[in-house]
Image (cartoon, rainbow, N blue to C red):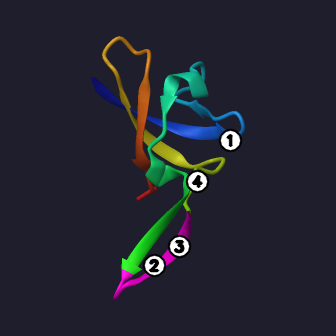
Amino acid sequence: MQFVYGKVISINPLKVSIDQKVILTSGFLVVPESLTDYKMTVEFAGAETAYTFKNALKINDKVVLLQQKGGQQYLILDRVVDS
């Protein structure tokens, strides 16, 4: 396994460019729930409240990916910020 860096170039369908010649399409990408828009219900003091987290990937987001051995699947680990 190895880490690679990429840039989101399309959302629907999801595409990530990892260099000038390689573009990964959604069939090669595994996206964790934390990088999507998702709902969560939280219970506090006996009361439940539903929250929507708007955290989906956007065009031009820079991401770090973990490449599966053999290179057929890539897990998007997180966004990366420029330092």
Report the disc number at residue 77.
Answer: none
Q: CA distance from mark 3 to mark 1?
A: 26 Å
Assess disc 4: are there few (<14), some (14-19) or many (≥20) residues with their C-alpha within 10 Å of its C-alpha.
few
Query: Which residue lies under the disc numbered 4?
Result: 56
Observer-nearest residue: 39 or 72?
39
Assess disc 1: are there few (<14), some (14-19) or many (≥20) residues with their C-alpha within 10 Å of its C-alpha.
some
**Could you say which quadrant of the image residue 12 lies in?**
top right
Does 57 sit left or right of 5 as displayed?
A: right
Looking at numbered disc 3 in the image, what kind of residue is underneath it?
Ala
Q: CA distance from mark 4 to mark 3?
A: 18 Å
Contact flag, marks 2 and 3 (Cβ < 8 Å): yes
Query: Which residue lies under the disc numbered 1?
Result: 11
Q: CA distance from mark 4 to mark 1?
A: 9 Å
Contact flag, marks 4 and 1 (Cβ < 8 Å): yes
- Position in image of residue 15 (x %, y %): 63, 32
Observer-nearest residue: 53 or 43?
43
Q: Earlier in the sequence, mark 2 or mark 4?
A: 2
Residue interval drawn in magenta:
44-53
Looking at numbered disc 1 in the image, what kind of residue is underneath it?
Ile
Looking at numbered disc 4 in the image, what kind of residue is underneath it?
Ala
What residue appears at the point 68 percent right and 41 percent down from the top-left corner? 11
Contact flag, marks 4 and 3 (Cβ < 8 Å): no
Q: Is residue 18 magenta?
A: no
Per the image, label 2 sits on a secondary structure element best described as: strand
Query: Which residue lies under the disc numbered 3?
Result: 50
Toward the right, the furthest residue is: 12
Query: Which residue lies under the disc numbered 2?
Result: 48
- Position in image of residue 6 (x %, y %): 50, 36
Classified by dominant secondary structure, the portion drawn in magenta counts as: strand
Looking at numbered disc 2 in the image, what kind of residue is underneath it?
Glu
